[in-house]
Amino acid sequence: MNEAIRAKLQSLPEMPGSYQMLDQNNQIIYVGKAKNLKNRIKTYFVGSHDEKTTRLVRDIIDFRYLVTQSELEAFLLEISLIKEHRPKYNVMLMDDKTYPYIEITHEKYPKIIMTRKVTKKNRFLFGPYPNVMSARDTVDLLNRIYPLRKCQTLPKKGCLYYHIGQCLGPCVYPVPEEETSRIVEEIRQFLSGNTTYLLAKLNKKMVEHADKMEYEKAKEIKDLIASVDKTTQKQQIIFADQKDRDIINYYDNGEFLAITILFMRHGKIVFSDTSIHDFFDEPVETLLAFLAQFYDKHLMPSEVLLPQSLSSDLLNNIFENKYLIPKRGDKLKLINTAYENAKIYLETNLQIHLQKLKRTLGAVDSLAKKIGLDSIKRIEAFDNSNTQGTQPVSAMVVFINGLPDKKSYRKYQVKSISGPDDYGTMREIIYRRYQRLLMEGLSEKPDLIIMDGGLGQVRACKEILSTLFLDIPVIGLQKDSFHKTDAIIGLNEEIISLDRHAPLYVFLTKVQEEAHRFAITYHREKQSKQIFASILDQIPLIGKISKQKLLEKYKTIEAIKNASDQELKALGIKESAIENLKIALLKK
């Protein structure tokens, strides 16, 4: 313990508040709250600790705190600081995982869509679903059964869906509000688990078609019935009240914490999710911080069941009086089930979790040590993509605490470079990125920049940073004759060899591949659009408006080849133009 910390410990107030632990770079590496700041902060610097807490304490160079009027205020401040700073040692939703939901949009003519964006504006939201595929299959099924609109914006003429009876055609004539409301209510009943009415209606249609010897149509209805049965198959545990519930419990082994959430929808358990976390406070405090973040991002059901150990004055603030701590009966059995799942998961998956930490935070710590930095939190990596100098683009990916932060990714269309000039491209993109960062007050300044290239790219980056008076460490990834990364170009342009079997090599390869994937995907999008547009320019009777419609509707030549004449007519393209289009594309 250094003298500065020793002196500050003596003057700590015995009041509630939030505290932040700082490293050598004055970055926040841990945020906590306390009923009594003096008693809580002292525990970090006296007595013995387990290995992970010792690692945290070893990184602490200073701390600061803010006194609050209550523990609740301290808790709210803690959560706010965790979201803002994403500290290295706090329990966090680091992978930004979200679950798919099904939404009936709130519009005059609504749509059925799959979404991951959960806000208070979502009025008719159903889920979560175990995975994207199950949600998408359900949306596809509902779109086949119910004739709500499918298009993003209403066209001027009826589209293919209108002509085949899968849309009421609000673009053709006004659909009565009563009709729309009836359909929406039927879909809500279906998504709420009540399929009796729908199945009865489908069975009646199937019989009618069979009686008329319309066997193909009868077969289509039979397939729909089978899809409904598959989509709404029964689960083992059923509550008669058909409420939506989340059932939450945890298990800890003194060093790590497993949190299990069972998702019950309409009285049935639909799926569960369990995750493992480090904790440096009491397990209950860590769980509260996790749940506050979880329900900030996810839809809260009508009831949340919690274990008795979680009894706290802070629960109302998280769960809006929707929580229940059961003491007996079937609900307590569910709490015990969640506990058993958490216990089994921790015991069987801890080594996998530790390996993941080694590949992420461990690899980042190893990188910092190798290149001579005290610590690294935020990494920004760049890659360029072009085809013989055409359609040059660049991309930036971001890793925080060793994990990709996809919402911070950026893609750039190169403006000043026309030929194959990798260094010139890099200078432009680095200038645009960090000049904007300066304008925004350096709120997202990286601890390290990684250039996917050799010494030339590194020097181009340093040159631009120097003109902006920015001091940000830059390294490069040097490739061998087989185009495989084999060394780091260090901060002083020294060559640092890499062990290809070490977690650091795996991590750097992941960063490199992610930057390349993001850049080349963007380049292909631009290239495909250019090729598509140039082909359309050469086809007689395909004018500017038709070209724009085709580019918006179809992304590839193959897609337009497969489009039916009816679909193309629905876009407003004349029959003679369609014929020219088909002839031209058949040659491609």
Image: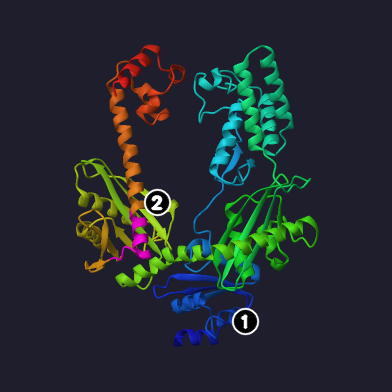
- SS of the residue under disc 1: loop
- Name the residue beneath numbered marker 1: 14
Q: Give the magenta range.
A: 498-512
Determine crowd level at label 2: few under 14, some 14-19, many 20+ residues with C-alpha closer than 10 A: some
Magenta-span inclusion, residue 336: no
- Left or right of 19 in this view: 587: left
**Residue 220 versus residue 309 in the image, above or below:** above
Residue 315 percent location from the top left of the image: 69, 62
Q: Quadrant of residue 497?
A: bottom left
**Residue 375 versus residue 433 in the image, above or below:** below
Q: Residue at x 61, y 27 (%)?
A: 223
Q: Quadrant of residue 462?
A: bottom left
Residue 282 percent location from the top left of the image: 61, 73
The residue type indicated by label 2 comes to: Tyr
Determine crowd level at label 1: few under 14, some 14-19, many 20+ residues with C-alpha closer than 10 A: some
Q: Which mark is residue 409?
A: 2
